[in-house]
Image (spheres, rainbow, N blue to C red):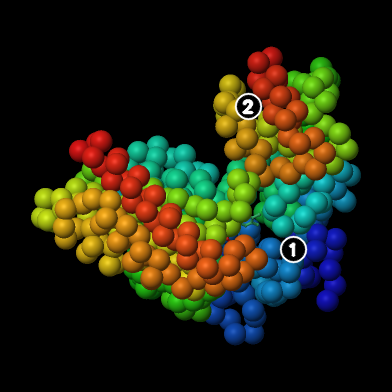
Amino acid sequence: MTTHKIALTVNGIQEQVEVPSNMTLLTMLRERLGLTGAKNGCAAGECGACTVMMNGEPVNSCLVLAVEAEGAEIVTVEGLSNENGLDGLQEAMIEVTGTQCGFCPPGGLISARALLDRNPSPSEDEIKDALRGNLCRCTGYVRILESVKQAAKGG
Amino acid sequence: MEVVSSGLPEFEYIHAESIEQASTFLLDESKDSRLFMGGTDLFVQMRAGARSPSLLVDVKHLPGMNDIQLKPDGSLHVGAAVNLNALARHEDVAEHYALLAEAAQSVGSYQLRSRATMGGNLCNASPAADTAPAALVLGARLIAQSGKDERSIPVEAFFLGPGETALQRGEILTRIEFPSPPKRSVGRYLKLGRNAAGDLAIVGVAVLGFPDDEAPSGYRFRLALSSVAPTPLLVPEVENILSGETMNDERIQAAARTAQQAAKPIDDVRATADYRSAMVEVYARRALKAVWAALRRDN
Ligand SMILES: Cc1cc2nc3c(=O)[nH]c(=O)nc-3n(C[C@H](O)[C@H](O)[C@H](O)COP(=O)(O)OP(=O)(O)OC[C@H]3O[C@@H](n4cnc5c(N)ncnc54)[C@H](O)[C@@H]3O)c2cc1C
């Protein structure tokens, strides 16, 4: 099988990777770049645990080929925090206990970050709509919604 | 077959230089080539073992594939690679083709829609394709190109069966064209799923209604269904029933029953045929009533 050399930016860092045609963006992030935040859940676009930002929009990275990310800007959960600390959403999630087992938040946080980037003060329905594709089996969702509301208030 | 940990079988990938080049690949009998857009149908089918193409052809980056254009005559051209979020939030679509925006928005989740395209939704030809009923009532035409040849296929002639379309080998859908919608028209897409989390439709009903002085009732309505027949289905009889006599609840009820009779639902994991049949009537009635109410309010 042919491999492809691709260049992309991941969490602000330029990367060059050689990938086989059938490698997904998720596998490349996890197994080539060691970014194991995004998770492989259902591998069918249902659960959202693999959600990462691609050129500013959240995508299910299990349904994107790595070779399609040529030239793209990718942000994973690892890229949400910086030298100044955690993202406001992460702070809020800790404070409100918006996470329990920890499997789904890497995806949910990316969807929520993308929502706040395009709509800084979303309604409850808008939050629910943006997070529809991020399944959580622990929290019952109420505290996830609270986390996003709190982060939105905090600006 | 060797499987890497992403679970997709092996294939080659081509970033095509032109549509002509892409159709040459698709026509090459020595390969089992497939075009893809967002891959949200195709990759899931490949993981399930339902398809194993040897070559995937990518044309999403080619000129025009991502364009949305409102033409001076009011018609709308949508590139086949336009994703459903981009379609739903485009100003001209939201303003003049609200039904299309509503249908696009009803698909899956936000992150799915940032990859899923209308081209892929139509070409995958699932009976449940949520953008298909809107395309049917809006009278869309699908522009297909093979080599340098282009043809325009009316959407009513596009769906041949589950997963089967009028596209010939080597033909690529490049854009979807919508004629200017009738003046003061109102549309709705109602979708019944198993849950609120973006499931495929058990029943989907699109209705477009508009005032028409030449119709004895003063209105015309078009209605199309998803998920209740081997293909998405336009129910032309509805137009006759509702244009003929004065509009009232009984006429709407008769039209909803006609939609129910036109449906040929099956049992599957989402619902039984009986339930689907009952829900066609309910959802057709609700959609017709909603559109009629909006028409009386606006006109
Ligand atoms: C979790 C999940 C939820 C979903 N929910 C919904 C839903 O609510 N409603 C719904 O309708 N669908 C749903 N889908 C199905 C799918 O997301 C949509 O049908 C989507 O619009 C497909 O578009 P795509 O660009 O991803 O197509 P792809 O997977 O890239 O392509 C689909 C098929 O069409 C062919 N094709 C694509 N583009 C062209 C072209 N330009 N010319 C010729 N052939 C072409 C491909 O070869 C392939 O066979 C869901 C899927 C998943 C995984």
Q: Is residue B181 left or right of residue A11?
A: left
Q: In terms of secondary structure, where does tag 1 sit?
A: loop
Amino acid, disc 2: Leu
Amino acid, disc 1: Ser
Viewer can see residue A25: no
Residue B21 percent location from the top left of the image = 53, 70
Residue A111 percent location from the top left of the image = 68, 36
Which mark, by number, is residue B270?
none
Viewer can see residue B6: yes
Q: Residue at x 47, y 43 (%)?
A: B88
| Most foreground residue, B83 or A150 | A150
Q: Residue at label 2?
A: A116
- The answer to whether B23 is drawn above or below residue A39 in the figure is below
Mark 1 neighbour density, 10 Å: few (under 14) some (14–19) many (20 or more): many
Q: Number of marks in the image? A: 2
Residue B115 percent location from the top left of the image = 60, 51
Chain identifier of the residue bearing label 2 in the image = A
Mark 2 neighbour density, 10 Å: few (under 14) some (14–19) many (20 or more): many
Give the spatial CA distance, label 1 vs label 2.
34 Å
Q: Residue at x 77, y 55 (%)?
A: A42
Q: Quadrant of residue B143?
A: bottom left
Q: Residue at label 1?
A: A21
